[in-house]
Image (cartoon, helix red, strand yellow):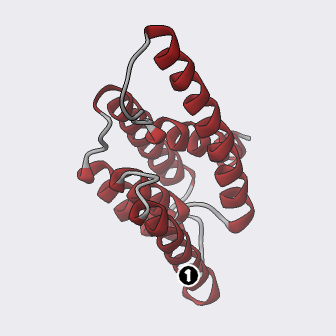
Amino acid sequence: MGGINLNMALLAALVLLLVSAGIEDARTREIANWKNAAILALAPLWWWSNGLSLLPDVALQLAIGGVVFALFCAAFYFNWMGGGDVKMIGALALWLPFQALAWMLIVMSLLGGALTVLLVIERLVRRKDGNIEIPYGVAIALAGLIAIREPLFNQLS
């Protein structure tokens, strides 16, 4: 196991990547591939530092992450989400145990819906035409930050 210092460093890196990705998506409606790749690449270190066994723990994380990524690839196929959003959800799924992941997806959906309503209202007020491009990475990042709060604070006690 890597210990508390490695766990804290990994969580800090994840927090910075999520905040950075959310801000970038709000500004440009894109999330840089390197940010999603970094979230993905740090997950095995997170597993190691938390003492996850290869079987069944890591295998389960990979399976859940793969299923989540595949489901959201369908959303991308139907043009409901951007590719960066899908990659971020898939990478983040590798960090979270099932219950925390389910919570994150629920919170993400609620935040994404609220963000959509706000952008629809803004569009009506400004009398804009055309499609609304939702920066769903903001909702994903906020939900991810909410979902990791427990491991973050458990490390401090």
Q: Quadrant of residue 107?
A: top right
Residue 117 falls in which quadrant of the image?
A: top right
- Which one is in front, 55 or 30? 30
Q: Residue at x 71, y 50 (%)?
A: 106
In this rendering, is residue 121 above or below 55?
Answer: above
Helix, strand, or loop for circle 1?
helix
- Residue 119 lies, with reference to residue 139, above or below; the image says above
Q: Can you give x and y, in whole percent of width and height, for residue 138 in the image?
A: 48, 35
- Residue at horizontal 30 percent and vertical 59 percent from the top: 37
- Dividing the picture into quadrants, the one containing residue 36 is bottom left
| Residue 103 image offset from top left, x and y in percent | 73, 53
| Residue under the point 50% across and 62% down | 46
Residue at the limit of the structure toward the top, as seen here = 125
Q: Is residue 112 visible?
A: yes
Query: Which amino acid does the dot numbered 1 rest on?
Result: Ala
Name the residue carrying label 1.
63
